[in-house]
Image (spheres, rainbow, N blue to C red):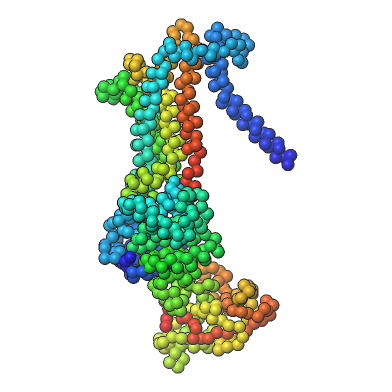
Amino acid sequence: MRRKTTQHALLYAGVVLTCAILVFPIYWLVVTALSEPSQLRQLPPSFWPAEPRWGVFGQIMAERPILLWLGNSALAAIGAVTISMIVSVLAGYSLSRFRVRGGQSLGLFILTAKMLPATLLVIPLFGIFRNLELIGSLWSIILAHATLIIPFTTWMLKGYFDTIPRELEQAAMVDGCSPLGALVRVILPVSAPGLAATALYGFVLSWSDYAYARTFLTNAQGNWTANLGITTMKGEYISNWSDISAASILVALPILAIYLFLERYLVGGLTAGAEK
Amino acid sequence: MAGIRIDSVTKSYGGLAVLKAFSLDIADGEFVVLVGPSGCGKSTMLKILAGLEEASSGKISIGDRDVTDLAPGDRDIAMVFQNYALYPHLTVARNMGFGLKMRGTDAGEIDRRVNEAAKILGIDHLLERRPRALSGGQRQRVALGRAIVREPQAFLMDEPLSNLDAKLRVHTRAEISALHKRLRVTTIYVTHDQTEAMTMADRIVIMKDGVIQQIAAPDVMFREPANLFVAGFIGSPGMNFLKAKAEAKGGGATAKLFGHDVTLPVANGGALAGKDIVVGLRPEHIAAGPGQVSFTVAPRLIESLGSEQYVYVDLPEEHRREASAGGDDETRRTSLIARLINPEPRPPEETLTLSFDPARLHVFDAASGEAIR
Ligand SMILES: Nc1ncnc2c1ncn2[C@@H]1O[C@H](COP(=O)(O)OP(=O)(O)OP(=O)(O)O)[C@@H](O)[C@H]1O
Ligand SMILES: [Mg+2]
């Protein structure tokens, strides 16, 4: 009995510590945003500003086209995720189900592609997009992000499809579906949690990109994404860290909202009841 | 409804031959059970019939249609899977109606047929539930229901009862038989349980390593097994096998069993002289007390089930067969089992006289394993 209590205590202590480590930077971001810039460097630091500047959000939205940036980020992420999901659902399903000659090495090849750092591809992609006259267009980062996302999501989805019993699509085919019909009518609905998790992952990857946007979009102000826009708030001599923090919070909010919205799909368990 | 003809179907995975020249004619409305040990190719045969796997060679017809190259959905068959494979995202009613919907049946007709099938199976109160909210037995019924609403040419069932507990299994077994009597749809049923095979089948197909060993009605299979494998597979407990040597005597053949010269029930005994044989004797054909051939033993173990007793006796050394590489159960090889019906209670340490009727013996060629009659 006593041992159990001690174990629980240790467990909770661990959880609390981990949460603290994870949450602290976010907390500090909020504190920074709400403080007067002049108070930021005081020692000892204050853990909550005496007079929080709640008006900062409205103020920076009036000063900068933050909504436009957010809209561009959203368009880019939605476009990249849509393309990625279509490609990786088909690729992941094939890798999971069909024994193709060389299928294994093909899978490994995709896996290697995801080990390459994104920055390595910036220059070749720039060359390609220049030829396609896509520099400055949102399509450039949509396609660039898709090349980043697809290797990951293909493997995530392959793993998810592997957990779905083959008999499910066999039943669908006996019931009159084509292989593609079985995928669309049975496998995809059953995979909703896996699809949600994968799409979310791709969305975050696209949303948090800076390198590609900086390279392809710098000269097209109207197409700036949020991350690119925020860095322009950093001046050469003085930077208003409070304003930058406030903008960062605004950029993080949509991701938070999507997490909350998708949570029930992410929990999984939809395949329960297929068998036995 | 239609008959099914399977014509020399073979299947290999790479170098591994899983089915070897499998041929079988199934009559319209017949209930055929494929039975055999794990890995013998039963499921593979069923999947080839369904069109889910491609045969390496051979031909399959349903009715008078050659379906060898048709997609599963175009074969007009329904399948019940071992794990049921219900669509988890659809309600029971939509699960059952899915196949009809795929075929463009109109909604009213689907409703009517789903309700009718649900009534037959006693699941009409579950129609709006999802599979995860059902018990194992209920899921099994939904899987059956999904097959019967389609009114297909044939049912294919792959061990549909193996996930049920023992009691429910016996119950559902009887129900499937009754359902078959009522609907008369050609059914191919796969199991590795010989009791299911014996109780449900019009005809049993016994397989081993992708080769058909015997095709026969359950009674015939039990009385006239074609070889040692079939003899050992059908019946519970399995047949006792005794190694012996045939000798010519008069016009017939005898063998020395438990010290007696026993006349073997074979037609052409003279031809057997000097041959190594295996004599088979079913546990239920051994009786307590003296009889035509009697012998006295000290039982090693007596298992009592109330209405019957299994008496385990050490087999004399000269009757034991060599341990096979395939690994027959060692206790089975070294013991004789007698199944005594309505036995007297008896203390295990007492010696016991057992007897059998030589006409009940089975004789097999020791080298080939084939039955000799
Ligand atoms: N996709 C496959 N690739 C390679 N070998 C396979 C494949 N599917 C089945 N086999 C092999 O074919 C043989 C027959 O398999 P099958 O599933 O038909 O056996 P079964 O008689 O249904 O056995 P069980 O009673 O265990 O279900 C087995 O040896 C199995 O390993
Ligand atoms: Mg099987």
- For this rendering, which residue is in front, A215 or B76? B76
Quarter location, residue B32: bottom left
With respect to residue A2, does B179 lie above or below? below
Q: Which residue is drawn at 51% across and 86% down?
A: B358
- For this rendering, which residue is in front, A200 or B328? A200
Q: Residue at x 33, y 63 (%)?
A: B153
Q: Residue at x 52, y 59 (%)?
A: B164
The count of marks equals: 0
Using residue B354 as the reference point, say whether residue A247 is left or right of it: left
List x then y, in percent, for residue B4. Answer: 32, 66
Q: Which residue lies furthest to the bottom in this view?
A: B250
- For this rendering, which residue is in front, B29 or A47? B29
Quarter location, residue B179: bottom left
Q: Residue at x 39, y 37 (%)?
A: A154
List x then y, in percent, for residue A79. Answer: 35, 29
- For this rendering, which residue is in front, A271 or B330? A271
List x then y, in percent, for residue B9. Answer: 32, 63
With respect to residue B210, does A88 lie above or below? above
Q: Which quadrant does the C terminus of chain B fall into?
A: bottom left
With respect to residue A66, does B220 lie above or below? below
Q: Is residue A60 visible?
A: yes
With respect to residue A217, does B214 lie above or below? below
List x then y, in percent, for residue B209. Answer: 41, 65
Q: Which quadrant does the N terminus of chain B fall into?
A: bottom left
Q: Can residue B14 be seen in this view?
A: no
